[in-house]
Image (tube, rainbow, N blue to C red):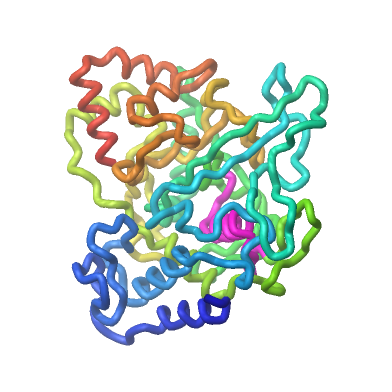
Amino acid sequence: MTGGVLRLSVLTLLLLSCGGTGLPGAVDAGVSGGVLAPSPGSPDRPLRGATVEQLRAFRAGDAVAEHLFDAAEGLGPVYVRASCASCHLRGGRGPGVTERFAVVSFATGAPVQAAPFGPLVRPLVTGGAVTPVLAPEGGLPAGTLVELTHRVAAPLFGRGHVEAISDAEIERVAAEQALRTDAIHGRIHRVTFHSHGSVDPAFPVHVEGEAGLIGRFGVKARLATLDDVVADALQGDLGLTSRLRPAELANPDGLADDLWPGVDLADEELSAVVAYTRLLEIPERVAPDPGGDTLFQSVGCAVCHVRSLRTRSDWPTPQLAGIDALVYSDLLLHDMGADLADGQVEEGAGPREFRTAPLIGLRDMSAYLHDGRAATLRGAILGHRGSGSEANDTVARFEALAPTEQAALLAFVAGL
């Protein structure tokens, strides 16, 4: 499919239907109320009560996310995957895994030199490129080594909820944790906006270089808005430039463009992907066992995995305005100790610091923690323990539970 045909297909989806109810959750996978309805059982579903216009935008963005790009459409010149769905299948986690590297001190584990083409491994080339971006294999300074870390792509479910959360709510939780007498003291990650403006002026508009925004997306909360998240992923992972990120990233071959001259992604495509991400519903959760919920709180999991945070009352998406967003996260950075440290510094977040991951869509996961090292939820909880980790006391309280209590807590988490 050429870039022009793709642009036409997206516009066709955006223009489908001028009437009907467009009710989400329709059982038919074809056309409902004049718009494409979600497939039954599919985890990537639009917000409950989505309007016809929202459903059009959702399906259009879904089409772009599923599309396999090629060099003639601007893919590359160096890249990780050829589609969004390669890492976020049906809005969920995986199957794609990315790698990041850092040259760190053997003695301290701290990074000691910058990666000239960025820390992301981009192993694939096209459009005239011949040299991928890989971790260095030699020529390292004395006393250093390459630390390679994996990143399993996070689910996109409920990210519109996360974006809508009021800054004041995050600040409130951080202030409450600062008063605690135990080790748990999460901090807000203030970050810089790196894109050229925003997609939809109805949402908060930011300008390139704007500092002091609350980071809430990514393993280390390095991004503050879904505009920046989408533009960053398209540019970094697929090598697709857009109005928000119009320049190709630096690469070993020094290529400033690819086989699609200029900006790769049309504004309609970019807007559709951002809208799709903003409109993804939190998957329906299993009715919680009150006993498991109580244990989740009593051992201390809920201190960081805060059940709900209040969204802005003036948020442009009506379904998300002034609600308690059930994200199970404080969106703060925490020191998780030496054992989870990954050598990465992102916008000032250090190698040991990680954002509390929202507990959303866990039923669709087969591996846990940021790098997928835990094959079970029990392993994920135990993986929070390590030298200097803020979570050590919480893990100890979990292990002190009776086997039946541990099972009840794990069942509760599994239903999230």
Is residue 207 in sight in this rendering?
no
Is residue 415 in sight in this rendering?
yes
Where is residue 288, by image quadrant?
A: top left
The residue located at (52%, 79%) in the rendering is: 7
The residue located at (69%, 71%) in the rendering is: 259
Seen from this angle, which residue lies furthest top?
400
Residue 325: percent from the left, percent from the top? 34, 49
Q: How many marks?
A: 0
Of 155 and 309, the residue lying toward us: 155
Decide whether residue 141 is among the magenta residues: no
Left or right position of 213 against 159? right
Where is residue 47, by image quadrant?
A: bottom left
Of 103 and 397, the residue lying toward us: 103
Above or below, 259 relative to 380: below
Of 105 and 335, the residue lying toward us: 105
Residue 191: percent from the left, percent from the top? 62, 46
Q: Quadrant of the C terminus?
A: top left
Above or below, 132 relative to 339: below
Left or right position of 139 against 291? right
**Start and end of the magenta stretch?**
222-245
Of 166 and 305, the residue lying toward us: 305
Decide whether residue 236 is among the magenta residues: yes
Left or right position of 155 against 307? right
Above or below, 311 relative to 35: above
The residue located at (64%, 45%) in the rendering is: 120
The residue located at (63%, 53%) in the rendering is: 124
Residue 278: percent from the left, percent from the top? 43, 61
Residue 179: percent from the left, percent from the top? 47, 25
Left or right position of 139 against 14? right
